[in-house]
Image (cartoon, rainbow, N blue to C red):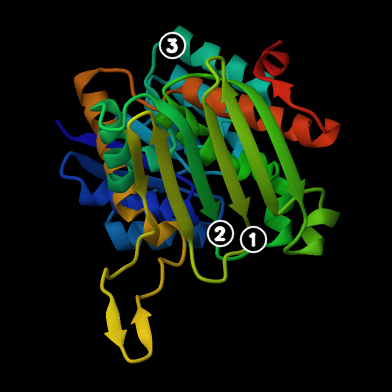
């Protein structure tokens, strides 16, 4: 069975997903839609698909599934429309910036019984998956603490910051999901600190560029997250899980894993420059998992609920910074 896809959104992340779809033997990219005509036509020319409008894709009998890569404020509406049209849906995070709106959207999906997967690609990174496998195999005993370091090589444009929903909803949300993925328990308390250390314009836009978060579970397990919009040495992506019998870690990745030793010392090649190159395998695995779920009629994972919980944690972090206190997740859920 070949899953026939339409791509909604032909920007930076849309291009990443177009590559992943067309590289998978179980998929075919049939159509692409974007408000910018050239962006859509460039992908259509590269991968041999058609340019269609979203309205046309909604009623297209030759489309089984859609990948939503449009601006965040369109995600929930599009999910509801394509769920009603009985298409399988893969949506980039977040579903919306409002917890209430996400909850409403998921009720529509549930009523229509349509597959929905949210794009937390890091769950599918081979290195992070190996960490999770070691944890599940009991190699480090009972999980006690998780450390996540995620730092971008440079800050995004201020115009992007203004519509992103802020660093916690845009950037840290990946780490909230990864913390749940590795802890194996739900998070009950969020305590966050945030500063503007990289770009004053980000602060003027109402956001932060440097944050630290402590997450706790009901059993007292901890996850610590360190985020920065500036890492002069490359795209910094590291995790460690500490347990009762030891620890397991995934280090930074490089395009070439070599080390050169001379009289000047030891040197290694630079880190990957950003997520498009660092997580190439993760994006391919992610689309593969979505295809497998749709083909087998199993519920995709990460689910819409996973997307909702990650957003709830982001909201708790925002409130923690504003009010200068630890915030119970139950406060956000009401």
Q: Callout 3 environment at 10 Å: few (<14), some (14 to 19), or many (20+)? A: some
Depth check, mark 1 against mark 2: the one in front is 2
In the rendered image, the quadrant that contains the C terminus is top right
Residue 276 vs 212, above or below: the answer is: below
Position in image of residue 13 (x %, y %): 46, 52
Q: Residue at x 45, y 54 (%)?
A: 237
Q: Left or right: where does residue 91 sit relative to residue 225? A: left
Where is residue 215, by image quadrant?
top right
Measured Cα–Cα span from mark 1 to mark 2: 9 Å
Measured Cα–Cα span from mark 2 to mark 3: 38 Å
Per the image, the residue denoted by label 2 is 152
Q: Callout 2 environment at 10 Å: few (<14), some (14 to 19), or many (20+)? A: many
Per the image, the residue denoted by label 1 is 156
In the drawing, what numbered circle is on residue 112?
A: 3
Measured Cα–Cα span from mark 1 to mark 3: 37 Å
Residue lying farthest top?
A: 111
Badge 2 vs badge 3, beta-carbon distance below 8 Å: no
Residue 108 vs 89, above or below: the answer is: above
Q: Left or right: where does residue 287 sit relative to residue 10? A: left
Q: Left or right: where does residue 228 sit relative to residue 306? A: right
């Amino acid at each position: 069975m070949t899953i026939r896809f339409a791509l909604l959104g032909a920007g930076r992340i849309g291009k990443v997903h177009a590559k992943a779809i067309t590289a998978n033997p179980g998929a075919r990219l049939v159509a692409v839609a974007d408000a910018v005509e050239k962006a859509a036509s460039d992908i259509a020319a590269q991968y041999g698909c058609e340019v269609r409008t979203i309205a046309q894709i909604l009623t297209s009998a030759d489309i089984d599934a859609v990948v939503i890569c449009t601006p965040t404020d369109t995600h929930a509406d599009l999910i509801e429309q394509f769920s009603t049209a009985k298409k399988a849906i893969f949506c980039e995070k977040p579903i919306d910036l409002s917890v209430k709106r996400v909850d409403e959207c998921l009720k529509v999906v549930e009523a229509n019984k349509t597959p929905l997967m949210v794009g937390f690609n890091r769950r599918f990174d081979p290195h992070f998956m190996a960490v999770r496998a070691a944890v599940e195999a009991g190699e480090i005993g009972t999980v006690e603490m998780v450390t996540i370091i995620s730092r971008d090589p440079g800050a995004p444009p201020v115009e992007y910051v203004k519509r992103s929903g802020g660093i916690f909803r845009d950037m840290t949300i990946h780490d909230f999901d990864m913390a749940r993925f590795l802890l194996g328990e739900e998070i009950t308390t969020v305590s966050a600190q945030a500063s503007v250390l990289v770009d004053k314009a980000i602060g003027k836009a109402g956001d932060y560029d440097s944050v630290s978060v402590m997450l706790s579970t009901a059993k007292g397990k901890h996850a610590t997250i360190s985020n920065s919009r500036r890492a002069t040495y490359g795209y910094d992506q590291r995790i460690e899980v500490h347990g009762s019998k030891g620890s397991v870690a995934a280090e930074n990745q490089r395009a070439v894993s070599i080390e050169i030793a001379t009289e000047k010392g030891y040197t290694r090649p630079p880190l990957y420059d950003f997520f498009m190159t660092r997580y190439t395998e993760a994006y391919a695995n992610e689309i593969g998992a979505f295809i497998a779920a749709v083909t087998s009629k199993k519920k995709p994972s990460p689910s819409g609920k996973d997307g909702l919980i990650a957003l709830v944690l982001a909201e708790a972090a925002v409130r923690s910074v504003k009010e200068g206190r630890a915030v119970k997740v139950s406060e956000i859920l009401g």
